[in-house]
Amino acid sequence: MGQSQVSAKPQNKKGFKEFVRKFLVSIKRQPQNIAIFILLVGFVYFSLNLTSISDTTALINTANMGQCEFCIMLFSILSFVVFLRTFPKRQKVKIPMLALTFLFLGIIIFMDVVYLSRINEALTREENRIIIDYASGTNTFIANAWSTLIVYLIFVGVVVVLLAALPVYSKLLKKINTSIDIEGNTNMTAVDIAGDE
């Protein structure tokens, strides 16, 4: 019983190390996956809080809020499609697609900022100012929409930085040693294959 537990631990340790090694190999081959993963997480977070944003649009209902909400969702989806076409497997980066990716991400950031400014105007204007009452729960969805847009803005900004810095950190990732050390491999001596004279 004790021996099986002792033998299981090294196997689990090796299994975890192998998982980490394969993960690092995958990242070394396709470092852009870091950026698309962060973009995916940000988009999922944004989508899960879309109800609060829609309620905020319906309540405040100032210029361009509906268009901003629609454009953020639309260009978030389009950025994924273009992103995947930018980095085809075993091919060079498609520069036009990369430029389009930056354009779409830039539109998302711009629309996000415009939407946040509309919320700020509604909360700070002198006439018909909208009040968020946390005690009663009145209009708290506006605060949730605000925080959601800020978080998504940060995610998209990080993706832009990662894409811009991709040539730099991809070289650094390639320096990570992911080779497998075979036991006894270091003690092997050269074999003389020359015939005896």
Image: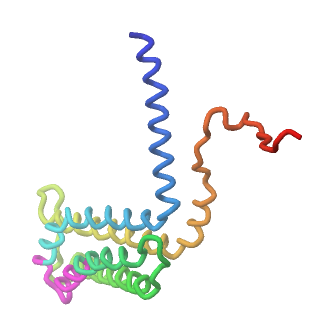
Give whichever of 154, 87 is nearer the camera. Answer: 87
Give whichever of 196, 10 is nearer the camera: 196
**Residue drawn at x 45%, y 12% as measured from the top left:** 3
Judge left or right: residue 54 versus residue 125. Answer: left
Query: Is residue 61 highlighted in magenta?
Result: yes
Is 54 left or right of 119, judged from the image as shown?
left
Horizontal arrangement in the rendering, residue 118 relative to residue 32 (left or right): left
Which scheme is used to colour this image of the protein? rainbow
In this picture, which residue range is highlighted in magenta? Answer: 58-72
Compared with residue 173, is residue 6 higher up or lower down, i.e. above or below?
A: above
Q: Quadrant of the C terminus?
A: top right
Rendering quarter of residue 175: bottom right
Which quadrant holds the N terminus? top left
| Residue 106 on the magenta segment | no
127 or 115, nearer to the observer:
115
Name of the residue lying farthest toward the front: 197
Visible residue check, residue 121: no
Query: Which one is in front, 142 or 10?
Result: 10
Q: Residue at x 80, y 41 (%)?
A: 192
- Residue 74, position as x, y percentages in the image: 23, 80
For the image shown, how many numbered marks are present on the structure?
0
Identified at 17% across, 65% down, the residue is 141
Please state the horizontal and vertical placement of residue 112, each as a whole percent of the image. 30, 78
Kindly tell me whether residue 11 is visible in this rendering.
yes
Farthest top residue? 1
Magenta stretch: dominant SS? helix
Residue 49's x, y, as percent?
Answer: 20, 64
